Amino acid sequence: MGSTSIARLGDGREVIVKQTPYPAAAEADGLQALDGAGVPVPSVLGAAGATLVLERVGAGRPPPGDTQWAALGRAVAAMHQLTHDRYGWHRDNHAGRFPQPNPWSEHWPTFFVEHRVRTHLDDPAVPVELRRRIERACEDPLLESLPDRPTASLTHGDLWRGNVVAGRWIIDPEVSFADRELDLAYMQMSVRAPFPPAFWGAYTEILPFRDGYAERRPILELHHRLLQVRHFGDRQLPQLEDLLAAQGW
């Protein structure tokens, strides 16, 4: 989220200059965390105020092959193998334009409900009746649908094809330690631009899907469905309504 332009440094290198709607240091922190986990990301060259300067990667963006996608699948699996004893992050960051709270928590369902669902419900973009239905779900059925203590993995938070450059580099993180299924659910939401089989084959060779993930997946989509309504308005409401209806909420 933000506007980008290409600039040239005094030594001739081309860089990406990004103007963010939030403190650029939060995004730089996420990129550095991913880099430390072995994920291919553009190098952070500077961050001040709302300005982030990044290494330019993927110039020309050639069509990626299966080998590149498989390597990325292994890198994402390695990221998810970096773990913590709690859910959250050492700082709050942003999910697109909106603040993303990351207080440390011992209980995954509570973290998800309070900091990935309820945090969206005060936005007037979410109609009152849908808000009430989601609040009722938060009181009991949603909490009971998620495991109490799945492994707290380093997650990107906004991992979709639009945040992958040339099948190789990952950008625009919204990191936290969370159940890795939160990343997986969002990665599988898009039917128009899915991650290719080579990616999934390499990922699941290292980290297979857990039993029951297919049932939890639409529940975990709720965070991003709400974000899409907040960012893009009424045209995203039918998908949110379908999700709630499918769960009986």
Image (tube, rainbow, N blue to C red):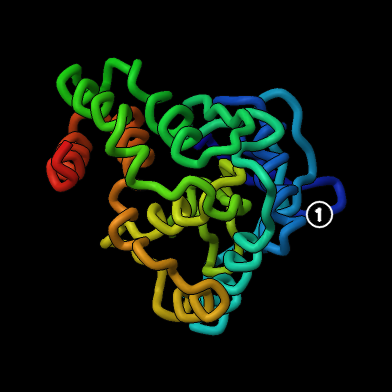
Image point (42%, 24%), residue name: 119
Image point (32%, 38%), residue name: 142
Residue 215: which quarter of the image? bottom left
Q: Position of residue 139 (x, y in %)?
A: 31, 27
Left or right side of 55 for 132:
left
Does residue 90 lie above or below 152 as drawn?
A: above
Does residue 125 lie above or below 199 as drawn?
A: above
Image point (22%, 37%), residue name: 236
Q: Of helix, strand and loop, which one carries label 1?
A: loop
Q: Is residue 14 visible?
A: no
Q: Is residue 80 visible?
A: yes
Instruction: Work out which quarter of the rendered image holds the C terminus and state it.
Output: top left
* Residue at the right extreme, as displayed: 11
Nearest to the observer: residue 120 or residue 94: 120
Q: Position of residue 29 (x, y in %)?
A: 72, 40
- Residue that badge 1 annotates: 12
Q: Position of residue 218 (x, y in %)?
A: 28, 51
